[in-house]
Image (cartoon, rainbow, N blue to C red):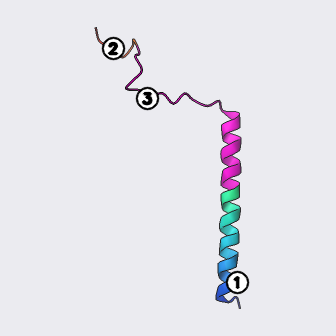
Amino acid sequence: MINNNERIRIRRQMQRRIRDVVAERRRARQLETPAAPTADPETTDSPALTTA
């Protein structure tokens, strides 16, 4: 039978592994796709959006 301290330790270990995997996947995704420009759409002057 697992006591409470062991249960907490196992849960924290699992959470740490999940965070590591998520971070690794995020890094891989950022490397494979180029970073999109983060310009504010309201401040950019696009000719297609202006009605003159």
Q: Residue furthest top?
A: 52
Residue 29: x %, y % from top left: 67, 40
Q: Can you identify the residue that label 3 sits on?
A: 40
Residue labelled with disc 1: 6
Secondary structure beneath dot 1 equals helix
Q: From mark 2 to mark 3, how far is it between C-alphas?
A: 16 Å
What is the span of residues highlighted in magenta in the rendered image?
21-46
- Mark 1 surroundings: few (<14), some (14-19) or many (≥20) residues within 10 A: few
Q: Residue at x 37, y 26 (%)?
A: 42
| Residue identified by numbered label 2 | 50
How far apart in space, not on screen, are marks 1 and 3 (Cα)? 49 Å
Give the x, y percent position of residue 24: 71, 50
> In front of the other: label 1 or label 3?
3
Amino acid at the residue labelled 2: Thr
Name the quadrant containing residue 32: top right
Q: Earlier in the sequence, mark 1 or mark 3?
A: 1
Q: For the view shown, which residue lies furthest in the left direction? A: 52
Q: In the picture, residue 30 is in which quadrant?
A: top right
Residue drawn at x 41%, y 26% as measured from the top left: 41
Answer with mark 2 or mark 3, whichever residue precedes in sequence.
Answer: 3
Q: Is residue 26 left or right of residue 37?
A: right
For the residue marked with disc 1, what is the amino acid? Glu
What's the distance in space between the residues labelled 2 and 1, CA to CA? 63 Å
Residue at 57% in and 29% down: 36
Q: Position of residue 27 (x, y in %)?
A: 69, 44
> Which residue type does callout 3 highlight?
Asp
Q: Secondary structure at mark 2?
A: loop
Q: Quadrant of the C terminus?
A: top left
Tell me which numbered mark, 2 or 1, is placed earlier along the sequence: 1
Residue drawn at x 65%, y 46% is: 26
